[in-house]
Amino acid sequence: MHKITLIVLITFICTGCASISRGVTEGVLGSRSGDKEDVRGCSIRGSKFQGLQSYLHPQKSITTSDGAIDRHPTLKVLMVHGIGEHLQGYSTRIAENLSQALSLNVVEARFKDISITHPAFPDQDLGKLRIHRFTNKQETKEMLFYELTWSSISSDEREIIAYDDSGEHSFRRATINNTMKGFMNSHVSYPLIYLGKSQAKIQLAVVSSFCWMLSRDWQTLDQHTQESCDTNQSDNFTELDDEFAFITHSMGSRIVTDSLQELTRHLEQRIKSNPNDQLVNVFEYLQKKQIPVFMLANQLPLLQLGREIPDVTNQYVDYCTNEGINHNKRFFRELTIVAFNDPNDILSYDVPPKFVDNFMDSRLCINFINVTINIAEVVDLFRLGTFANPAVAHRDYEDDERVIGIITQGIEEQNIAPIVEERCTWLETR
């Protein structure tokens, strides 16, 4: 009971009543002046890593039985949101900011939509997947941006407390308290629901989205479709030569790591039961992939509370080095996790190496990089101390030039975005 109370309290403080907290803060303190020096901190701790730019490959020609066609490996990026009800289109700003930074200045006028289904949950909504295509003007580089909207999965369970928003109860509250309670009812349910019976469905929505990324290119996707992408069918995985990346926000960090682990574990079990299964080729291919995951306002430590520890921990050397005795049993060549955290966001966390060793599956072969970055400005409240808006600290990553620069350019000696080189410090680990 104490754990639930803590989750409720922290979730509200961090993101609740965002408009109220922002309005009060800006009204009393004023917004940051355009000519005032921006002194918000930014420090990166970890090994060098590649940004999305490195996964944008030039066009190459492929000859088929029907003649020569142009084909190039495509960069495919999946966005997964966190708590709160989300409508399709929620990722538009970050998708467009990334595309501009990558010089992909052309977008297809029409997106493509998939209503996710699966035989394991017949006649149930498993969310929506929306795909946008970005290219440069010469169409020699291409990024498909996949936006997963999974919040509808939890709608039935959230109805349990929906009555509390009715006039029968709300009129008894003070105005501001009623706004606060409305936020609590609409947002705090999500982490509790994810830890319950809807977890499998939410993870399946992510796995299905990844399956669609692995199975189709832009031309073979229908404009609108409602069907399953079955990970048990090896012939679904036809686009393995493409490049894949994930961007998460808030609770999405936990959802994606859990989902990738479930997918690879499923493939491993299939192969053990039938060594001749064609899925062995898929599993072996994933073992060669290096996949980046950019976590905005990551919540990995918080959402580990009360959970079982993975079966395989503290065995990075055995699984993830060429000399390791279990190297052929790893899930990926490397899962590069770049975790962003504003220290004034009450609900996100810096992740120490010991946490990765003790609480994350060694078979994922994680290379963890912490980015401690002030998204919200810290202001002086005179004699009361300093303050930063926790709602801004949790939410406003998508327009921050430093965040966009880190995601697109990465951190390497000769390849750092100018804004990142100027405004961030990098402490390299080895």
Image (cartoon, helix red, strand yellow):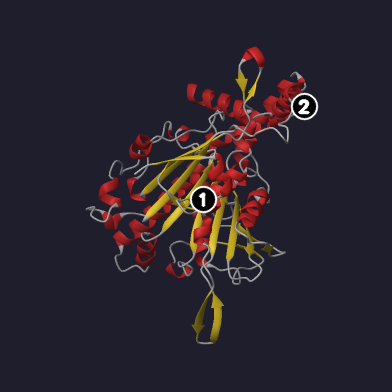
Three-letter amino acid code at disc 2? Gly
Mark 2 nearby-residue class (10 Å; few <14, some 14–19, many ≥20): few
Q: Residue at x 33, y 49 (%)?
A: 363
Front residue (pair 178, 17):
17
Residue 145 percent across, percent down from the top left:
60, 58
158 left or right, relative to 44: right
Which numbered dot is residue 246?
A: none
Q: Is there any visible trace of residue 132 in the rendered image?
A: yes
Q: Secondary structure at mark 1?
A: loop
Q: Residue at x 41, y 51 (%)?
A: 335
Q: Nearer the viewer, mark 1 or mark 2?
A: 1
Front residue (pair 53, 176):
53
31 left or right, relative to 76: right
How far apart marks 1 and 2 lie (CA) works out to: 54 Å
Three-letter amino acid code at disc 1? Ile
Residue 250's quadrant in the figure?
top right
Residue 204 percent across, percent down from the top left:
50, 52
Q: Secondary structure at mark 2?
A: helix
| Above or below, 254 relative to 129 | above
Q: What residue is shown with label 1?
A: 416
Q: What residue is shown with label 2?
A: 167
Q: Residue at x 67, y 30 (%)?
A: 183
N-terminal of the pair, mark 1 or mark 2, is: 2
